[in-house]
Image (cartoon, coloured by chain):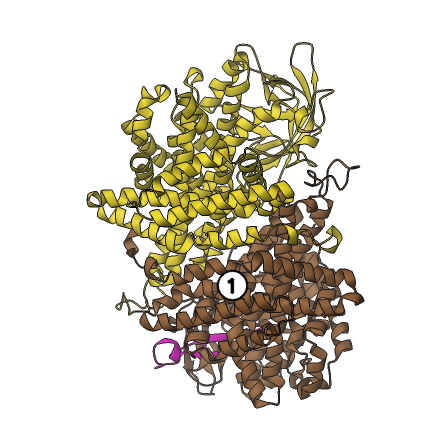
Chain colours: A yellow, B brown
Amino acid sequence: MPEFNAPLRDMRFVLHEVFDAPTLWARLPGLADHVDADTADAILQEAAKVTSQLIAPLNRSGDEEGARWQAGKVSTPKGFKAAYDTYIEGGWVGLSGNPEFGGLGMPKMLAVQFEEMLYAANSSFALYSALTSGACLAIDAHASPALKSTYLPPMYEGRWAGSMCLTEAHSGTDLGIIRTRAEPRADGSFSISGSKIFITGGDQDLTENIVHLVLAKLPDAPAGPRGISLFLVPKVLVNDDGSLAEANAVSCGSIEHKMGIKASATCVINFDGARGWLIGEANKGLAAMFTMMNYERLSIGIQGIGCAETSYQNARTYARERLQGRASNGAVAPDKMADPIIVHPDVRRMLLSIKAMTEGGRAFASYVGQQLDLSKYSTDPQEQQDASALVALLTPVAKAFFTDTGLDSCVLGQQVFGGHGYIREWGQEQLVRDVRIAQIYEGTNGIQALDLLGRKVIANGGVALRLFTAQMREFAEQPDKPYARQLLQAVQQLEDLSDWLQARAKADPNEIGAASVEYLQVFGYVAYAWLWARMADVAQRSMPDDPDFYAAKLATAKFYFNRLLPRTASLEQSIRAGCESLFELDAASF
Amino acid sequence: MPEFNAPLRDMRFVLHEVFDAPTLWARLPGLADHVDADTADAILQEAAKVTSQLIAPLNRSGDEEGARWQAGKVSTPKGFKAAYDTYIEGGWVGLSGNPEFGGLGMPKMLAVQFEEMLYAANSSFALYSALTSGACLAIDAHASPALKSTYLPPMYEGRWAGSMCLTEAHSGTDLGIIRTRAEPRADGSFSISGSKIFITGGDQDLTENIVHLVLAKLPDAPAGPRGISLFLVPKVLVNDDGSLAEANAVSCGSIEHKMGIKASATCVINFDGARGWLIGEANKGLAAMFTMMNYERLSIGIQGIGCAETSYQNARTYARERLQGRASNGAVAPDKMADPIIVHPDVRRMLLSIKAMTEGGRAFASYVGQQLDLSKYSTDPQEQQDASALVALLTPVAKAFFTDTGLDSCVLGQQVFGGHGYIREWGQEQLVRDVRIAQIYEGTNGIQALDLLGRKVIANGGVALRLFTAQMREFAEQPDKPYARQLLQAVQQLEDLSDWLQARAKADPNEIGAASVEYLQVFGYVAYAWLWARMADVAQRSMPDDPDFYAAKLATAKFYFNRLLPRTASLEQSIRAGCESLFELDAASF
């Protein structure tokens, strides 16, 4: 039976020691008055308790039972409702929400740690509130004051949930071709009709209401993505006083049978002239939806880290306990029938690969959280603008790189168990099934890579990229810092490759899509190199305070630079081979 | 709903055009009289029919229903028994079996094509007979004449099945610590007691009898792997005339609940003083079992290729039909709402990656099949000995590289479908779940890699490796051959790396385990480079005969050399970083 223990010491290391978050919080007016190091620690401690004791125990039973759909209604697995009720009492749904409407206003940098714990404990459960938090963000940013004051408080409380209705059967990545329509009604609201698929938490039995954020087309809207508007469509209509009125014309047509996240209901949601309210401007719905989507993209990235962390914890325990074979340099447990398998170099390679990628990912997620906090709370316009540019640049990397390496890590964590990893009993196979979706939803990782290279790097001439590489260079150009030389080389490699692609893309736009996935991976490995060098730097300086802990950080950094960072070499070679060999085959000859 | 169409044209290309198998068969006395090009084609055609029409349709229903265990008996999913009865009528179980006992005596090179089809159609179904074929091989090679004549005929017929009983709860990779005991009985048979786990097809309702090949220890056997003997233990005892007698003391204690291959029963098998017969010499059971294990290792490798082929076929069809977005260089279907996604470079990259690895794997499997045929049928002792050495060298590569790239390919094939790949309806997620086991069973891929580098390369001073690299060099040193220069570089890289490791391993045996997995991958990529160069060579020469087919081969070869072979660069860097960074962490600090 898998266990999850929140990696609190590691999270504090990142927050307090690597990024010195409390000092940042103290200088940001929106945060200074209600969060400091002690508050943050207390929140992390409570989060660890809730996730490991309340939510993690429902992970396997939730997978076995799954969400069910009967007579138009979804029921969540046994125990979910009771756990959800306890969970929302803690205020977790509104953790980083707007205090004006009942959110707790905590920094994103702290919230990402909590999100990691939540996914690590139970990805299916996590999704029910992840969508709510994201929907709140879009409502807070773009909806009218009336909608905000009606919807945000019960959503932050978790009494109402949110959903994100984009995909239709014929329209996934290509949202320009959606068919859901919105007809204006005399009272200023709209009548929404259409069918959406793959709606996570589109129906459930946990909350009193579900607030669907729906992309639809107004009459005479321009074709394509510039003709899409965003609507708020509640499952149950709401009276002016905030109480619930009659049901809206929204129904759940069925749920999907999936590889994993089986306790999360993935719904077909039908809108049959349902009443909805415009969020933001007409025909600018995609931009407003992106507020939610960017939130979810980082969140889903963190699913990759969370699942990998749990897989690691279980694989590590197993590797220490499972006796099989002998160490190459002589038995370490001569009194036992065999040595624990952690003596074998290949088992160590697997564990260290997961460890290095998970801890690198945690640091990267925290850095993106820091930039989100700066973009929201900084009073320096330049700092604020730079932070927003960095968030835009780094969000697709976080989403795709965390989840690609998250699958790899869960597969490795399963492999450590040998045959026992393939059977359900140990939970490692569920992690592989659950994490796999994270490479697909919220925009496939291929789409993230196109977003990164096409929009975030090439379209702006590399301005945002240079902001980021300048930060990495600042560290790497201090020769006394650990791994400074290797990091500088890696940053140079990323810069050169970006310049080369910038030039190539002018000649043939297909060069972008031909390079994008591998480019994103190079980007991720270089960024992690910077973070591992920074973590090693802190560890070196702090060594006397906690020698075992910091020595482990240094050892993992060394493994990362020796054995994982070299992966950029092949990725670069493949990218520089260009798009030519992708286009020699006719579609018919595949 | 996934479909499978046997890739007959590609299989003929490999058999007849790349390897000119009929010419080889004609000169081998054991094959010349009963197989030629026409026989082979007829068999492939019939195999295609059986696998795609009879067996593939049970793949999804088998997964949904799963094997069940009740009151000590396993039942296979609906339709399996009827399909199995039809299947064995074709003589497929004994396809390459010994004609003296009713096998068809077909070359392994042909049988590997059939096995690929079988796994591509339905991995769970395939396993029921794959174990039988392997057990027959071990019996034929090591058992007494009496056992052979009693057991082989009904096993080749498929009326009786085989199983492979190695693993115990505390003993998987480390077979030296098994506890199952064998006590001699007065009549020369043995009384077997112990409990085996993870026994594929350990019980089922398809055959009249199951012949378990069981590893056990004789009284006073030496400790460790040199004290293991192999026994034949039938589920039902057999009278002297071959008819079935009473049940043996063999029972199925339960079956596992697994990530995939759910229609294949993975059993706990208890032997409670069951009667068994020694196969081969006492205490030399592991060597005898390896006859079966090596067969199964190649077979399980082929599972990787088969699953990848099916994933590819479905992804290709989907990519041609799914309309989403527009081509970067202008719409190709301006009359439709969007272009088929096969216009996008990243979709092409995914498809070509699967295609290049699957076709490379098929050629490699066929080459190993050729060496197996030479080792069995050649009348030239040197040729025979070289072929055996090559089989020993290449079997772990086939098992691990086919299945590692098989998982990657199935994940890519699922990714092409976006969200539709994650739901059960399209079948892509089942392929990922089913293929995942192939990296684990029959010796994890980590164990294969240790076998390759430790035993097959380093222990014999690289003798077998040089046999193989000499063949690759022979091609690469002809400068007019396609990709000769790149291939020569790649072979040189493999040789240099092997020499380097040979030297390093002397200083520290942990260098073997630290390098082995990545070394095996370098080996695989270099071997595929040789095979792709050979395939390109044939395609160039044959172009006028079938321009579209050969042009596709040339395009795929180009993609392989441009975009996949570069992966060896990073693998080499990681290997050359050595084992040091794997051993800096205490077990407690992980």
- Decide: is B70 above or below B141: above
Q: Residue furthest left?
A: A544
Res. A57 image quadrant: top left
- Would residue A162 be found to the left or right of residue B191 on screen? right
Residue A88 lies within the magenta run: no
Between B348 and B45, the one lying in front of the other is: B348
Residue A337 appears at what percent x and percent y? 31, 68
Residue B340 appears at what percent x and percent y? 72, 43
Q: Residue at x 59, y 57 (%)?
A: B562
Per the image, label 1 sits on a secondary structure element best described as strand
- Decide: is B409 above or below A510: below
Residue holding disc 1: B267
Between B260 and A185, the one lying in front of the other is: A185
Between A474 and B210, the one lying in front of the other is: A474
Three-letter amino acid code of the residue under disc 1? Cys
Residue A516 appears at what percent x and percent y? 56, 44
- Would residue B252 be found to the left or right of residue B84 on screen? left
Q: Residue at x 34, y 58 (%)?
A: B582
The span shown in magenta is: B210-237
- Decide: is A586 above or below B333: below
Q: Residue at x 35, y 67 (%)?
A: B510
- Would residue A430 be found to the left or right of residue B95 on screen? left
Q: Residue at x 50, y 70 (%)?
A: B492
Res. B124 image quadrant: bottom right
Residue B218 lies within the magenta run: yes
| Residue B55 shows in this picture | no
- Would residue A56 be found to the left or right of residue B95 on screen? left
